[in-house]
Amino acid sequence: MTEHRRFIRIVYNSPATISQQKQQWQSEIRDLSLHGLLLIRPKEWKPVHNNMYNVAFSLQDSDIVLQMETELVHYCDDYLRMQIAHIDIDSISHLKRLVELNVGNDEFLHRELEQLSDLHNH
C-alpha cells in the first residue's frame, strides 16, 4: 500500500507528556511534522472513547515547551499517531522553525505551510 503523506515528517526524539483530563502518561516523540506526531505508546495507556489529548514536549537543550491539542488518529501496540487539532502561536512558530532547520529547504517548508493553510481554510 502506498502512503500519501501531505506533510514532510522529520525524525525527532524527545520525551513528551500526553494528558487527557486527569490522566497523564510519559512518552517519547519519534517523528513530527507541522500536522502531527508519532509517539511511543506508553505501556499503561489504554484507548478511550474521547480521542482528544494534550501533548507537551521541550525543545532539546532549551526551556521552550511546545503544547498542542491533538486527536488520536491511529494506534498499535508500539505507537500512537496524533494529528494536531489546535496549537498556540508560540508553539507553531517553534515547530515551524524546528521543521525548517531539519528540512533545510525553504521551498519544501513554504509548500508545507500552504498545504496546512489550505486544510484549515476548508
Image (tube, helix red, strand yellow):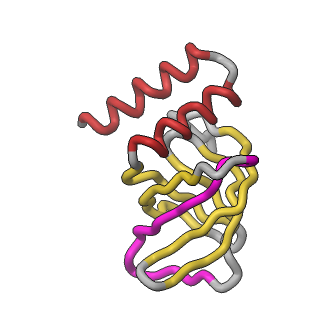
Q: Residue at x 75, y 52 (%)?
A: 13
* Quarter of the figure with residue 108: top right
Residue 62 placement, left or right of 50: right
Q: Quadrant of residue 20?
A: bottom left
Left or right of 54? Residue 101 is right
- On the rendered structure, is 114 left or right of 94? left
Magenta stretch holds residue 52: yes
- Whether residue 81 is situated above or below residue 53 in the rendered picture: above
Residue 99: percent from the left, percent from the top? 62, 33
Instruction: Say which quadrant the C terminus sits in.
Output: top left
Which quadrant is home to the N terminus? top right
- Report the span colored magenta: 45-61
Q: Residue at x 72, y 69 (%)?
A: 78
Instruction: Give above or below for 105 relative to 18.
Output: above
Which residue is found at the position 69% from the left and 20% from the top?
Answer: 104
Point 62% across, 46% down: residue? 32
Frontmost residue, 5 versus 16: 16
Question: In terms of depth relative to the viewer, which is nearer, 34 or 89?
Answer: 89
Q: What is the x, y in percent for residue 82?
A: 52, 58
Q: In the visual, does 10 lie left or right of 20?
A: right
